[in-house]
Image: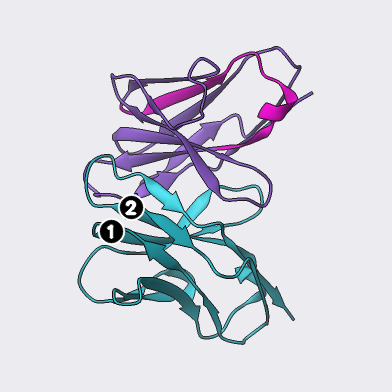
Amino acid sequence: GAVVSQHPSWVICKSGTSVKIECRSLDFQATTMFWYRQFPKQSLMLMATSNEGSKATYEQGVEKDKFLINHASLTLSTLTVTSAHPEDSSFYICSAKNRDTYNEQFFGPGTRLTVL
Amino acid sequence: AQSVTQLDSQVPVFEEAPVELRCNYSSSVSVYLFWYVQYPNQGLQLLLKYLSGSTLVKGINGFEAEFNKSQTSFHLRKPSVHISDTAEYFCAVSDRGGYSTLTFGKGTMLLVSP
């Protein structure tokens, strides 16, 4: 149980285009989902916290107009990178929290974004 | 606010040797503690967690960790490593309330050689 999927697993796009990444909890209801960014050989940096039906809470320094997060249901959150540029290239990982498992987060497999 | 320090960025060991990956944390409130493993180009997999109770926590793949409140540490250990344990290991903490966001350490790369 507690499986989280991400789609796509990798994406290559041209500079200036927008890219949407989906995060789904497959077998549980995720009241909260988190989006992280990971640069090569570095730790995960929390970008935003997303609660179903409400606006996401962004961490300091994260542009909310560039990284649009939508958490429309208890099993789906999306991250849209708008007008992507090469510096947005990174590994994006989502996680989801089950209301029944206290603080444990279940992580998706990640999405590798490359902006040319 | 919390912070996590993983003292070693890289730990090379030989197969079947014991290993300890160190983690220290700082927090003004009580926390939950976690160890995650990340294989190349993959997400994070939970190894073990400390929520309360016994300070010695056993996880998957033969790993265990001990919570030491006085030393604010949560070191990860395995008595005999395998080649397949080669991966990045992250220690993380979260507070016990609110949205309980995770704060990660910078990670320790465990390199197991034959």
Q: What residue type is disc 2 on?
A: Ser
Give the structural element (helix, strand or loop) at label 2: strand
Q: How is the image coloured?
A: by chain
Question: Which label was assigned to residue B94?
Answer: 2
A114 above or below B14?
above
- Residue shown at the point (39%, 61%) measured from the top left: B34
Q: Do pointers 2 and 1 mark residues of a single chain?
A: yes
B108 over A2 or under it: above or below: below
Nearer to me, A25 or B87: B87
Magenta residues span A74-92
On what subunit does the disc labeled 1 rest?
Answer: B
The chain under label 2 reads: B
> Residue sitting at 44 percent across and 74 percent down?
B75
Q: Do the residues labelled 2 and 1 touch (CB within 8 Å)?
A: yes
Residue B82, percent across and down? 62, 77
Q: Which quarter of the figure is the C terminus of chain A placed in?
A: top right
The dot on residue B106 is none
User: Image quadrant of residue A115?
Assistant: top right
Q: What is the crowding at mark 2: few (fewer than 14 residues within 10 Å), some, or many (at least 20)?
A: many
Residue B46 position by quadrant: bottom left
Q: Position of residue A9 (x, y in %)?
A: 62, 34
Which of the marked residues, 2 or 1, is nearer the chain's N terminus? 1
From the image, state the color of chain B. Answer: cyan
Chain appearing in purple on the rendered image: A
Vertical placement of residue A14 versus B61, above or below: above
- On the image, numbered disc 1 is attached to which residue? B31
Q: Which secondary structure, mark 1?
A: strand
* Residue A35 in sight in this render: yes
Q: Which amino acid does label 1 sit on?
A: Val
Which of A72/A39 is in front?
Answer: A39
Q: In the image, B11: left or right of A115?
A: left
CA–CA distance in space, label 2 to label 1: 5 Å
